[in-house]
Image (cartoon, rainbow, N blue to C red):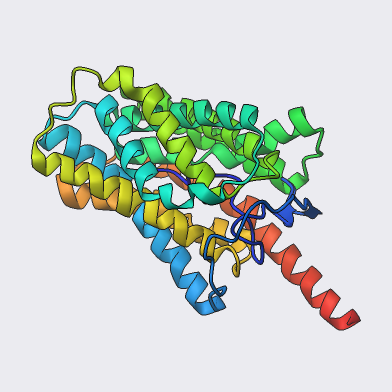
Amino acid sequence: LVQPCGAAPPAGSRLDEPAVAQLNWDGHVIENRGEPDGDSGGEGRAPTRATALLLVVLVAVMWSLGGVFVKVLTGRYGVEPGAVACLRCVAAGLVLAWALPWIGRPRWGRVGASSLAYAVVVGFFVLATHLTTAANAVLLQYTYPLLVAVGAVVVFRERLGGRTVVAIALGTAGVATILAFSWAPGAWLGFVSAFALATFALLQRSMTRGNPIALACVYNLTAAVLLLPLAWGALRIPLPALLLLLAMGTIQLGVPYVLFIRALRTVPPTDVALITLLEPILNPVWVWLAVRESPHASTFVGGGLIIVALLVRFVGVRRTAVHDTMAERREA
């Protein structure tokens, strides 16, 4: 699976208080204080930096299991991709349902639009992973931060910095390499999923109210309803496969999302973006170990270009943030 929500609050924000300080797509800090709604939902103390960094690594590892879950469920147990996408969302939504009492007062029109985009993300990603290699699916989907940067120019009239333009060029070259030389039926679905995820992230940016975990629960349960037609008639699933689907919704999405939100209270968003690049790297490794699926050589080339593009995009942000922090400390 993918990072489930582009609206997760950064370091220091409360569970029910959206981003108090976000990064725009050129990496500069912007203020975006939302209205806190409801209680904290039992957030507890923020973790130490070392603990939070370990949590982010753990989250990336848990997210990276999405490919192997899909391959085993569809290949070994014959579960239809639509049923995998639908029931995984059901399991994840139920795991996160404890946060619903603290959902607050979100803008429900945007919640509906976000749920639709999220359903497209999940459905197309599972289909892409089934129809092509897991490496192709996850790497193509990981172009979404670059698409968000373009969308921010169109929607929010933001200016792209030179580093972001270079990142977009490298990412485009990576996508073209994968699609041109390691084409498989369904490969394009991974890129469609990336477009949907970029749309979802842009929608989340305007969500200034509501508990992010409760909203993630709503997104998953709504997506399950929207994906039900794809699963209808394919819900007679053996018990071992049902247990795997429960594990997928719990271990690969529900639990890591809670850990992700908790870690973001301590770790800067740019550090999180860099650490979670472990997901597209580890995803095909687990698939190779489980089902011996080997990506085409061009996938390594195109995937390498995409990873480099993301590093170009985020490493500069990290350096700028560190420089600004040091300058502030000197002034203080």
Q: Quadrant of the N terminus?
A: top left
Residue 66 appears in the picture as rendered: yes
Horizontal arrangement in the rendering, residue 257 relative to residue 127 (left or right):
right
Horizontal arrangement in the rendering, residue 172 relative to residue 221 (left or right):
right
Q: Quadrant of the C terminus?
A: bottom right
Please name the residue shown 71% across and 40% down the image.
165
Horizontal arrangement in the rendering, residue 239 relative to residue 117 (left or right):
left
Please name the residue shown 50% across and 33% down the image.
194
Please name the residue shown 75% across and 28% down the image.
154
Between 235 and 177, the one lying in front of the other is 235
In percent of width and height, residue 265 lies at 60, 66
Q: Is residue 28 above or below residue 229?
A: below
Horizontal arrangement in the rendering, residue 259 relative to residue 236 (left or right):
right
Between 216 and 293, the one lying in front of the other is 216
Residue 282 lies in quadrant: bottom left
In percent of width and height, residue 162 lies at 76, 45
In percent of width and height, residue 205 lies at 68, 41
Q: Residue furthest right?
A: 331
Residue 69 lies in quadrant: top left
Between 263 and 309, the one lying in front of the other is 263
Please name the residue shown 11% across and 35% down the image.
77
Residue 302 appears in the picture as rendered: no
In percent of width and height, residue 270 lies at 63, 59
Q: How many marks?
A: 0
Q: Is residue 19 above or below residue 202?
A: below
